Amino acid sequence: SHTPGLISFDVNGGSRRIEGQGACRGDRLVVSLVSTFEETLHSSKADENTKPGGSSFQESTLVRSVLDALPTPIFVKDREHRWVLANQAFAALTGLNPEDLYGKSDYDLFPSQEADVFWEMDERVFNTPNQVLGNEEALTQADGSQLWIYTQKVVTTFTHGEDLLVGVITDITARRNA
């Protein structure tokens, strides 16, 4: 079934909206948005489109704004388990800015017991392409509080040939504690 959707966000101080029809699969929307963002970041064209005001730059800014407008924590990792992209909601869980996460792994931020679980699940996902895998996990936030999360992860291959893991987190703490 298809449900109309609307996402509102700001780009460089101006309000934008995206409207349309889409399947009720948030992970597919996220993969599509991240794919567009990654393709823009890895573009090898050194032309006017990659400079402020160019269409690739505007597309990158648009996708970044959409990802940051979503209340759902979203992240992307490379094959070495390092974050290459994270939205504001994910960064808030860690107490860092998204840019401060890039190049770091779970072991840089979380207790080793939790990082072991995240790493093991990431490996399962990397070794099971084209399938969305989910797992309930404990996550210790920067302030020391603990959440229970349900993380859905999928590997996707981008146009530059690199496999990247895309993750979407749902806070299930209230449900677990009920």
Image (cartoon, grey):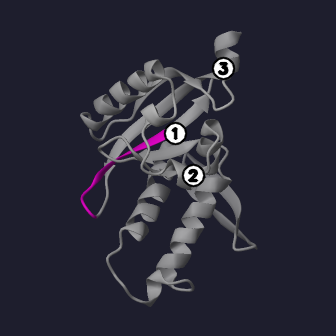
* Other residues around mark 3 within 10 Å, as few (<14) / some (14–19) / many (≥20): some
The numbered dot on residue 173 is: 3
Q: Secondary structure at mark 3?
A: helix
Residue at 71 percent across and 9 percent down: it is 178
In this view, 21 is above or below 96: below
Q: Is residue 97 left or right of residue 165?
A: right
Q: Amino acid at mark 2?
A: Pro
Q: Secondary structure at mark 1?
A: strand
Check residue 162 for magenta coloring.
Answer: yes
Q: Amino acid at mark 1?
A: Val
Mark 1 highlights which residue?
168
- Residue sticking out furthest to the top: 178
Check residue 144 for magenta coloring.
Answer: no
Magenta stretch, residue numbers: 160-167
Q: Is residue 124 left or right of residue 167?
A: left
> In the picture, residue 52 is in which quadrant?
bottom right
Residue at 49 percent across and 45 percent down: it is 75
Q: Amino acid at mark 3?
A: Thr
Q: Is residue 25 visible?
A: no
For marks 3 and 2 on the same chain, the one whose residue lies earlier in the sequence = 2
- How many marks on residues? 3
Q: CA distance from mark 1 to mark 3?
A: 16 Å
